[in-house]
Image (tube, coloured by chain):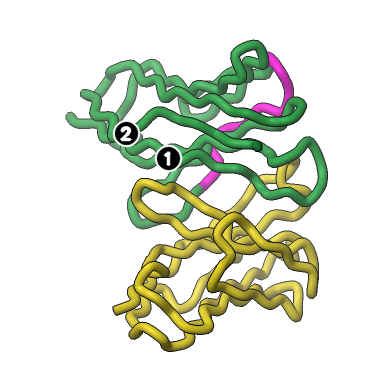
Chain colours: A yellow, B green
Amino acid sequence: DAGITQSPRHKVTETGTPVTLRCHQTENHRYMYWYRQDPGHGLRLIHYSYGVKDTDKGEVSDGYSVSRSKTEDFLLTLESATSSQTSVYFCAISPGAPGANVLTFGAGSRLTVL
Amino acid sequence: GNSVTQMEGPVTLSEEAFLTINCTYTATGYPSLFWYVQYPGEGLQLLLKATKADDKGSNKGFEATYRKETTSFHLEKGSVQVSDSAVYFCAHEGRNSGNTPLVFGKGTRLSVIA
């Protein structure tokens, strides 16, 4: 395995509750990403990080926040989950600039918001 | 803005048939181009890439050629197998350099039947 794990792998929660998804890597890669995958929309970027405490928004960042206090962990938080955030979330890592380096993806976290 | 357009799926083929999945992009300059594949229940993984015009990426019998004239990067395989059943994503760099993450297409689901 490439040394990237996501937790939890499956979660069911209720509307309005906070949810945190964790991405942990053992590769010491600089870049980390959170994507969501939905039918008809493919893969969409939520947030990404290009270093500790350096993060930026993606195309679907509303309703999500992230934190990266150390190289190995990238947390995605839904402050108040909504049904529209039901999705499969993927974390990815890369050692350097996105175009020049391969992305390695985690196995995904399936979130259901009731 | 930068975008990737790939053919709608699903695509259903018989084993040993020829596969083409079309991909076109809009971008500034000449970004690196990628095909990622997602097998059932897994995260995405890199299938092949091309970093400059006229480059051909190849892997596992799949090929794609970077065509700057037509801004295309079509994926082809001469004889598909049942094990090729997966979702295929075309992607490119957001910009030629810098931190900008990859831009993905919506994915094309391929089903190969015996």
- What type is the residue that disc 1 sits on? Gly
Q: Position of residue A16 (x, y in %)?
A: 41, 86
Please report contact status of discs 2 and 1: CB closer than 8 Å, yes or no. Answer: yes
Q: In the figure, residue A66 lies in which quadrant?
A: bottom right
- Chain ID at mark 2: B
Q: Where is residue A14 in the image (x, y as percent from the top left)?
A: 34, 85
Q: Is residue B63 shown left or right of residue A74?
A: left
**Which residue is label 1 attached to?**
B107
Q: Can residue A110 be seen in this view?
A: no
Q: Position of residue B84 (x, y in %)?
A: 35, 35
Q: Identify the residue at horizontal 26%, vertical 35% (top origin).
A: B111
Q: In which quarter of the image is the N terminus of chain A?
A: bottom right
Q: Where is residue A106 in the image (x, y as percent from the top left)?
A: 52, 62
Q: Is residue B94 shown left or right of residue A60?
A: right
- What type is the residue that disc 2 sits on? Gly
Q: Identify the residue at horizontal 68%, vertical 77% (top origin).
A: A67
Which range of residues does the magenta coloring cover? B45-54
Residue furthest to the top in view is B69
**Which residue is label 2 attached to?**
B9
Mark 1 or mark 2, which is nearer the start of the sequence?
2
